[in-house]
Image (tube, rainbow, N blue to C red):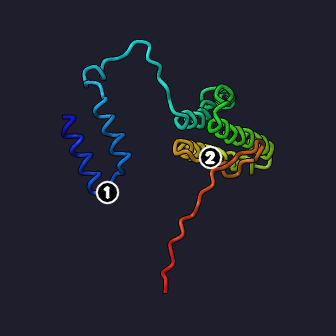
Amino acid sequence: MDLDQIEKLNDLKQKGLISEEEYQQAKERILGAQPQQAASAPQPHTIMQTNNYDYAMVLHLTQFCSWLFPFLGLIVPLIMWQSKKEDPYVNEQGKVVMNWVFSSLIYFLVSLVLCFIVVGFFLMAILFVCSIVFTIMGAMDANKGVIKNYPMSIKFFDVRETVRTAVVPASPQN
């Protein structure tokens, strides 16, 4: 089976789909891999590690905890952010989440006051929809490695957003 995998790798290298370096790394992984039976057996005291993209995604999604108990959507993300603040990526994502949590709290309070003239009810409905959409969009961006403030978010914390470079097609030479 290892020979088949190495032959497939060699074909990919010959076609130019992978570089020599990628070929060597993959070959070392195949040859250095443990047998399937030993790899599938659970190891005692194995520590599961998640990458920081997954952690940041969950950090965004914990805002939905406020549906279970009021202010839990503020407390849980705050605790998660502070527990991994030393990681620069998680720190930036935590700032993004806190900017939106504090902004939406302010928007909610303003809407609550405006409920006396009926407009507040519409604003609360819009805020509810925006909170769902923005949170899901933020979680998806965080899982892709993108740092981006939510739309309509007041910037309480300075966030270094990911710079997106535009791909400009080459102009034809005349």
- Badge 1 marks a residue whose secondary structure is loop
Who's the residue at 31% across and 57% down the image?
16
Q: Callout 1: 10 Å neighbours few (<14), some, many (20+)?
A: few
Who's the residue at 34% across and 42% down the image?
24
| Sequence order check, earlier mark of 1 and 2 | 1
Q: Callout 2: 10 Å neighbours few (<14), some, many (20+)?
A: many
Q: 29 or 87: nearer the eye?
A: 29
Real-space Cα distance between discs 1 and 2?
A: 34 Å
- Tell me which corner region of the image, top left, top right, bottom left or bottom right, holds residue 102: top right
* Rendering coords of residue 52 (x, y %): 55, 34
Mark identifier at residue 147: 2
Pointer 1: what residue? 16
The answer to whether 159 is drawn above or below residue 49 in the figure is below
Left/right placement of residue 54 relative to residue 31 reads right
- Badge 2 marks a residue whose secondary structure is loop
Q: 143 or 65: nearer the eye?
A: 143
Which residue lies most toward the bottom here? 174
- Count the labels in the image: 2
Q: 108 or 162: nearer the eye?
A: 162
